[in-house]
């Protein structure tokens, strides 16, 4: 079994299409899972296109199992669209770019199918070796007692924690400074800042090793580099 985990997309449709094509071209009929870590919308130029692309991919692609997790930006958009939060709570963190991509003025004007899709997204995926979430987990709680707000919003004390919970926590949410994946003994950050000029990154896992076996970015990126398990940089193509 092979699993590909994808970092934050933020409306960067062109990078997403290229990276997904690259990963699909590697599939050889073995059991393959794609896990998208959330934050499909906001800040970038084509949030609508990203959502539609992922929805279509889930419908048409039979070679892989697709899991799309909810990020804080989807969670915020849903709350604004349902009237739980005022509009400025979302537009202030990049929601204005999403409204522009849909050609609407308010979150509740986004097509119902897209809002329903965002609402249906799970907050985590556990494959027995790794826990995939958007932002991270609260270090002082066991995995089965985590709350949604922590899973999609947390930074500290998670990022500084050395606690190992029996799973490698694979997450995004916090862009890395060097635009490379940040691999630690207890977590892996895959937000390499695609919307800020960095690459869109995917980590590749197998079913026997906890750590990623390699990293991929979209073709043409000058950051098609990864990290070995000991933290050293390595050109992985």
Image (cartoon, helix red, strand yellow):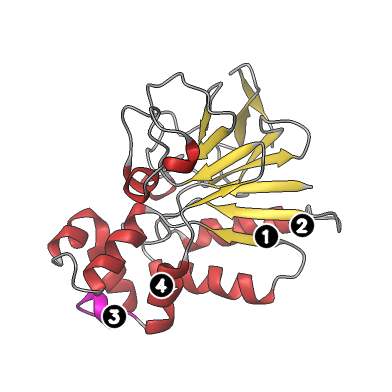
Residue placed most toward the observer, 233 or 138: 138
Whether residue 214 is situated above or below residue 151 in the rendered picture: above
Q: Position of residue 23 (x, y in %)?
A: 70, 53
The residue identified by callout 3 is: 103
Q: Which mark is residue 21?
A: 1
Residue 103: image quadrant is bottom left
Task: Give the secondary structure at mark 4.
Answer: helix
Whether residue 190 is visible, yes or no, is no
The answer to whether mark 1 and mark 2 are in CB contact below 8 A is yes
Q: Along the horizontal axis of the image, is 233 left or right of 75?
A: right
The residue identified by callout 4 is: 48
Mark 2 surroundings within 10 Å by alpha-carbon count, few (fewer than 14), some (14 through 19), many (20 or more): few
Task: Give the secondary structure at mark 1.
Answer: helix
Q: CA distance from mark 3 to mark 4?
A: 10 Å
Which residue is at a point 24% across and 74% down the rendered structure image?
82
Q: Position of residue 46 (x, y in %)?
A: 40, 67
The answer to whether mark 1 and mark 3 are in CB contact below 8 A is no
Q: Which residues are magenta?
A: 104-110
Q: Which mark is residue 25?
A: 2
Q: Earlier in the sequence, mark 1 or mark 3?
A: 1
Q: Which mark is residue 210?
A: none
Task: Give the secondary structure at mark 3.
Answer: loop
Q: CA distance from mark 1 to mark 3?
A: 28 Å
Whether residue 82 is situated above or below residue 14 in the rendered picture: below
Q: Along the horizontal axis of the image, is 81 left or right of 31?
A: left
Q: Position of residue 65 (x, y in %)?
A: 69, 61
Q: Along the horizontal axis of the image, is 187 left or right of 62?
A: left
């Amino acid at each position: 079994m092979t699993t590909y985990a994808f970092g934050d997309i933020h409306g960067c449709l062109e990078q997403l299409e290229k990276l997904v094509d690259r990963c699909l071209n590697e599939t050889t009929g073995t059991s393959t899972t794609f896990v998208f870590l959330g934050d499909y919308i906001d800040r970038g130029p084509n949030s609508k296109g990203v959502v539609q692309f992922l929805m279509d991919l889930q419908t048409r692609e039979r070679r892989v199992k697709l899991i799309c997790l909810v990020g804080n930006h989807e969670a915020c958009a849903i709350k604004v669209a349902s009237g739980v939060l005022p509009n400025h709570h979302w537009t202030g963190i990049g929601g204005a770019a999403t409204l522009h991509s849909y050609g609407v003025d308010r979150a509740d004007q986004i097509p119902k199918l897209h809002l329903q899709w965002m609402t249906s997204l799970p907050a985590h995926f556990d494959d027995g070796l790794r826990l995939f979430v958007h932002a991270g987990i609260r270090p002082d709680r066991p995995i089965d007692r985590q709350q949604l707000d922590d899973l999609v919003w947390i930074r500290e004390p998670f990022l500084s924690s050395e606690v190992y919970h029996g799973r490698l926590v694979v997450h995004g949410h916090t862009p890395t400074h060097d635009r490379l994946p940040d691999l630690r003994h207890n977590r892996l950050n895959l937000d390499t800042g695609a919307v800020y000029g960095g690459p869109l990154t995917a980590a590749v896992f197998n079913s026997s090793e906890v750590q990623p076996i390699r990293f991929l970015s979209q073709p043409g990126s000058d950051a098609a580099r990864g990290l070995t398990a000991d933290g050293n940089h390595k050109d992985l193509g």
